[in-house]
Structure formats: structure tokens, C-alpha cells
């Protein structure tokens, strides 16, 4: 598969590396506003560097990976889809719900695969959680908790990562976008949202630093959701799923799992903990990027398989990306109206 990459920042370069290390893909070009960044990304390869979107799109390509700031996702994705290319778009799908809908509709009209980079689905902690649920080890799911947070604006490399409208919002569009997706990943869908967001910590207009919500699946299974830039202990993402026979927790960082099961009221409880010392050591020595790269490689593998007709893979699609945007917008709306927001199933 011939693939081009739009965006040569930190994540874009990891996407480039995932393509170079896949024997079934060929990197043909990289586009970035900075010619130097594009040149750096293709160093040592036969790919070409571009700063002009139209010239980039003239390349013979089968797919495009979009890894720009969110405000440019729509123009990049639509240009690729109009040329008949499959698209793997970094999360969030865009910086507005309306733009996300236009991208999804364009993919439908073009009959091309649109995938969204919710790569936490491929992290070992989440694989364990999903497998545990699918195997019925905790019984019927009763409720879910999801959390994503870090300790503030110093974590960002550039203003666009946290300032609206370029970012699309605050914590819900940052760490919270993963939490939204993980909730849907285990619930199947979310169709009702009641929540509250605030900007009282960092005071960035349009960029919430805290958002708390209750999400409901169509069958009424609730998930409590919290996205924050005020997690003073530092970065943390976790999901906890409670069932009729136990619970399973997955968290990062560090990468950990906890499973508690009880077959009946009088049965003994079994507790299993999973630690990932090899990941902790690798990240300590080489950075978090090593774990992200591994997830990108698996995501790319599933993206290629999906373009060939495969289904049932962990890969997030356009609807997943769109609903994550809609959930963030719903919390914002609920904050204003003090009422639940109801969303039709996608």
C-alpha cells in the first residue's frame, strides 16, 4: 500500500516510522507547513517532501494519514477522499462536530475507509479489559468509569493543542477524547449525556479544564466520565468496568490491570493483577513514544486489513470519531441547559 502522511510533527513522525517498519506499506510522501520538518521525516527514504497540498495529492497513493492540528483535518481528509484515497486520521477527527460530519459523509460517498487514531484501544491495558469483558469473566456489565487527566498547560508543546477554536475545546478534546472512545468501546454506543464543564483552573476561553458527565448506552448502562487538566498527580488514564461477577480495571501510566471475580454470593473472590515492567523500563529509558509507536503499528495493520475488506477489528472508524466529538459537544450543551442531551445511534 502506497501511503502519504500529512503533518510531520511528533506524532506524524511516529506515523511515518510505523509505515516504514511495515513490510506491506510504502511511504511515498510527507506534507508539512515546514519544508524542513517534511525533509526530516523522509530522511533516508525514497519518499518526497511537500509543502503544497495539491502537489502532494498528485502523488500516486492508496491512502493518506492525517496528523495535523485538528483545525486542518477536514481540508486534508476531504482532499484525500475526493481523490479516492483511504484515510487514517489522528484523533480528534476534527475541531468541530460539523466538520466531523462532513468528513464522515465524504468517506461514505467515496466508498473509502475512514479510520480514526484512537490508539489506546491497542494498548495492553485496554486489550486485557476488552478481552475480559468479551469472555464474560465479570458477567453482565453493570456500569463503567472512565478518566483521563494531566496536570496542566505545561504538557503542551504548542498553543494550538489547547486553545480554541483551533483545538476544538479543552480537556474533552485532549485526554478526554480517548476516555469518550473507551467508554463507547465497551458500552457499544452512548446515546444520552448529562454533564458539566468549567474553565476555572487555567481560564482559557472555550477550553474546559474540567468536564464531568454521566453517559448512557441505549440499554441504560451508565458510565461516569471525567476529563481534566487539573490532575495534580500527573498524567493518568483509566477505565473500570463493573459487572455482575466482578470488575476489571486498566490504567496508564504506568500500565496496569486489576481483575476481581466472584462466581456467586458465597464463592471466594479471585484477584489478579497485571504489571508490565518491560513497558515501564522501556518508557523510562526511551520515552512514551515507544509504546505509542507499537500501537500505531498495530493500528496501521488493522487499517490495511480493513481496506481489504476485513471487519470486527479494534480499529476505530469515522462514526467512532464523530461520536467522540458529539459527546464533547453534548457535555458543553448540557452545562448550558442543565438538561440531558440525547443522541441518535450512529
Image (cartoon, helix red, strand yellow):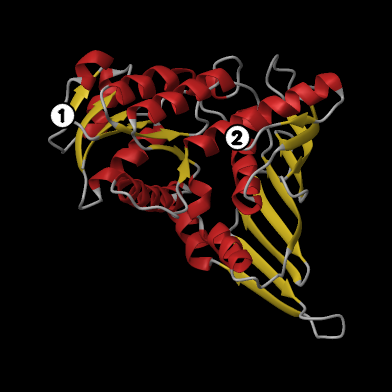
> If you read the primary sequence from the N terminus, does the residue marked by circle 1 or circle 2 appear first?
1
Give the residue number, with chain letter if any, for mark 1: 60
Instruction: From the top left corner, tell me how far across and down residue 155 is, in percent.
Output: 59, 33
Mark 1 packing: few (<14 Cα in 10 Å), some, or many (20+)? few
The answer to whether residue 106 is above or below residue 245 is above
Instruction: From the top left corner, tell me how far across and down residue 307 is, in percent.
Output: 31, 44
C-beta proximity under 8 Å, tags 1 and 2: no
Give the residue number, with chain letter if any, for mark 2: 324
Tell which of 277 and 223 is nearer to you: 223
Mark 2 packing: few (<14 Cα in 10 Å), some, or many (20+)? many
Tell which of 145 and 11 is nearer to you: 145
How far apart marks 1 and 2 lie (CA) works out to 32 Å
* Quarter where residue 82 is shown: top left
The residue at 60%/36% (across/down) is 177
Instruction: From the top left corner, tell me how far across and down residue 290 is, in percent.
Output: 41, 51
On the question of residue 57 being in view, the answer is yes
* Quarter where residue 339 is shown: top right
The C terminus appears in which quarter of the rendering? top right
Q: Is 200 on the left-hand or right-hand side of 117?
A: right
On the question of residue 171 being in view, the answer is no
Instruction: From the top left corner, tell me how far across and down residue 175 is, in percent.
Output: 62, 37
Q: Secondary structure at mark 2?
A: helix
The residue at 72%/27% (across/down) is 330
The residue at 57%/57% (across/down) is 126
Amino acid at each position: 500500500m502506497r501511503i502519504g502522511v500529512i503533518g510531520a510533527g511528533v506524532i506524524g513522525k511516529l506515523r511515518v516510522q510505523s509505515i516504514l517498519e511495515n513490510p506491506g506499506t510504502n511511504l511515498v510522501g510527507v506534507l508539512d507547513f515546514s519544508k524542513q520538518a517534511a525533509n526530516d521525516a523522509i530522511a533516508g527514504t525514497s519518499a518526497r517532501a511537500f509543502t503544497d497540498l495539491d502537489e502532494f495529492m498528485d502523488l500516486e497513493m492508496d491512502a493518506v494519514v492525517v496528523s495535523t492540528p485538528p483545525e486542518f483535518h477536514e481540508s486534508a481528509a476531504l482532499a484525500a477522499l475526493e481523490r479516492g484515497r483511504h484515510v487514517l486520521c489522528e484523533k480528534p477527527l476534527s475541531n468541530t462536530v460539523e466538520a466531523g460530519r462532513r468528513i464522515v459523509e465524504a468517506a461514505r460517498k467515496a466508498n473509502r475507509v475512514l479510520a480514526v487514531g484512537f490508539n489506546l484501544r491497542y494498548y495492553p491495558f485496554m486489550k486485557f479489559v476488552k478481552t475480559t469483558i468479551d469472555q464474560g469473566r465479570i458477567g453482565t456489565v453493570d456500569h463503567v468509569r472512565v478518566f483521563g487527566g494531566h496536570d496542566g498547560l505545561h504538557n503542551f508543546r504548542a498553543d494550538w493543542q489547547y486553545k480554541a477554536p483551533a483545538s476544538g475545546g479543552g480537556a474533552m478534546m485532549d485526554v478526554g477524547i480517548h476516555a469518550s472512545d473507551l467508554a463507547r468501546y465497551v458500552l457499544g454506543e452512548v446515546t444520552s449525556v448529562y454533564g458539566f464543564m468549567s474553565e476555572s483552573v487555567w481560564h482559557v476561553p472555550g477550553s474546559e479544564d474540567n468536564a464531568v458527565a454521566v453517559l448512557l448506552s441505549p440499554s441504560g448502562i451508565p458510565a461516569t466520565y471525567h476529563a481534566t487538566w487539573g490532575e495534580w498527580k500527573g498524567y493518568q488514564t483509566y477505565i473500570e468496568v463493573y459487572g455482575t461477577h466482578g470488575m476489571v480495571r486498566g490504567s496508564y501510566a504506568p500500565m496496569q490491570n486489576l481483575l476481581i471475580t466472584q462466581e456467586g454470593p458465597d464463592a471466594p473472590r479471585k484477584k489478579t493483577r497485571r504489571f508490565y515492567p518491560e513497558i515501564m523500563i522501556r518508557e523510562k529509558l526511551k520515552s512514551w513514544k515507544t509504546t505509542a509507536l507499537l500501537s500505531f503499528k498495530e493500528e496501521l495493520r488493522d487499517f490495511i486489513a480493513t481496506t481489504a475488506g476485513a471487519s470486527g477489528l479494534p480499529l476505530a472508524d469515522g462514526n467512532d470519531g464523530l461520536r467522540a466529538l458529539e459527546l464533547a459537544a453534548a457535555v458543553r450543551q448540557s452545562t448550558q441547559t442543565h438538561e440531558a442531551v440525547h443522541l441518535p445511534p450512529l
